[in-house]
Amino acid sequence: MTASLAYRKNEQDILSGNPPQKYLRILPYIPGSRVLEIGSAEGVLSLLMAKGRSLVVGLEKSLERHESALELQKHWAVFPSPVFINGDIQGNLELLARVETLVAVRTIYYLGDDLDRVFKKVGETVSNVVLCGNRNRADRWRAGTPDEPLGEMNKYASLEGMKELLIRHGYKITTEVTEGDEIVVGHKD
């Protein structure tokens, strides 16, 4: 697996500590001092979130992207520095007990049939969830355009799908952002 498109297109700027707005726009919506980002890719958002937080964990399934995150971590020298783990959320559910906020950007639809099982666990321990969808996938789902291999899971790339998921698992929706890749924030007392 190669680096994500946003990373490839902006690699030199990112390496020099100047990430594009795509990464920065989600920061104001992320509450809490202990955060887990699933699908952290090359670690840009996790590194940005680390400033001012006591714990940030970036969890990435792709070994290549995980290694890129470790390299970027050396370039940025952020303190406190996030912890990067190579793995997926299904195999690392114990991490949920360590955090108060879960962040997932362009990721949850890849959980497929495990989506509700994972979010049942999220709902048991995590107070805040910040989801960012994928405008292109959401538009294809809304249009009824088949998109394999994810098919109907593209619903969870949309504002409607992300909200439905969070409400189904006991979260109150506190924020909705409709421009660009849609963002939904849920909170549970």
Image: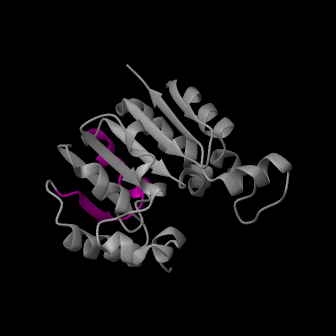
Q: Is residue 53 left or right of residue 162?
A: left
Q: Is residue 151 left or right of residue 100?
A: right
Vertically, is 85 above or below 141?
below
Residue 160 percent location from the top left of the image:
68, 36
Q: Residue at x 70, y 57 (%)?
A: 136
Within the magenta stretch, is there residue 94?
yes
Asked where in the image residue 106 lies, by quadrant, the reply is bottom right
Residue 180 percent location from the top left of the image:
61, 48
Within the magenta stretch, is there residue 113?
no
Query: Is any atom of residue 63 visible in this view?
Result: no
Please tell me which residue lies in front, 38 or 178.
178
**Location of the C terminus (image quadrant):** top left
Query: Which range is magenta?
Result: 81-97
Asked where in the image residue 47 lies, by quadrant, the reply is bottom left
Residue lying farthest top? 189
Q: Residue at x 45, y 47 (%)?
A: 25
Vertically, is 154 above or below 122?
below
Residue 157 percent location from the top left of the image:
64, 49
Q: Residue at x 42, y 60 (%)?
A: 88
Residue 187 percent location from the top left of the image:
43, 26
Q: Residue at x 42, y 23 (%)?
A: 188
